């Protein structure tokens, strides 16, 4: 049977804020697709969500630094679960420190969350 719930895609869904957003959307009746970067962490994270009763949360690993991969990921989510009704762009990282105290490398890491592929 096809999914009958509206679909929400949360990039960075397996992080701290992302987890709270995923759970809130799941509680509101969405089928939530959480984006991740680390497959091992994501698998454990999903097991925890399901154990906590959030069975309407799934995973999608999409390289957000790659435009083509984003389009393909959105298409895959659509084909598997249905049209995406909500998109929450929550992927990102932080480094402690104000902009004027950050090194160039720290600043770049915040802007470029996929260090294997620079802008």
Image (tube, rainbow, N blue to C red):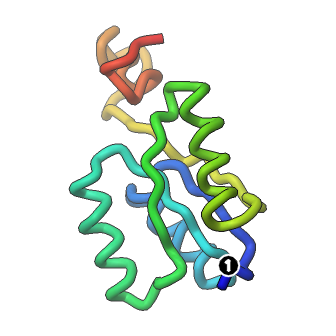
Residue occupying the far front of the picture:
1
Q: Position of residue 117 (x, y in %)?
A: 38, 17
Q: Is residue 19 left or right of residue 82?
A: left
Q: Is residue 20 above or below residue 1?
A: above
Residue at 28% in and 64% down: 43
Q: Position of residue 115 (x, y in %)?
A: 32, 21
Residue beneath label 1, please?
A: 3
Residue at 35% in and 44% down: 37
Q: Is residue 77 left or right of residue 100?
A: right
Q: Is residue 83 above or below residue 36?
A: below
Residue at 73% in and 82% down: 4
Tell me the quadrant of the picture where the N terminus can be found. Answer: bottom right
Residue 31 quadrant:
bottom right
Q: Note whether residue 17 is visible.
A: no
Q: Is residue 119 left or right of residue 86?
A: left
Q: Position of residue 108 (x, y in %)?
A: 39, 16
């Amino acid at each position: 049977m096809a999914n009958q719930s509206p679909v929400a895609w949360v990039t960075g869904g397996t992080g701290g804020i992302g987890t709270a957003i995923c759970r809130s959307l799941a509680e509101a009746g969405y089928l939530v697709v959480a984006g991740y970067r680390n497959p091992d962490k994501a698998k454990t994270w999903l097991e925890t969500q399901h154990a906590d009763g959030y069975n309407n949360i799934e995973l999608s690993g999409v390289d957000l630094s790659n435009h083509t991969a984003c389009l393909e990921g959105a298409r895959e989510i659509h084909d598997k679960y249905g049209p995406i009704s909500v998109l929450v762009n929550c992927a990102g990282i932080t480094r402690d420190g104000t902009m004027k105290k950050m090194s160039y490398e720290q600043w770049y890491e915040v802007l470029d969350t996929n260090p294997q592929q620079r802008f």
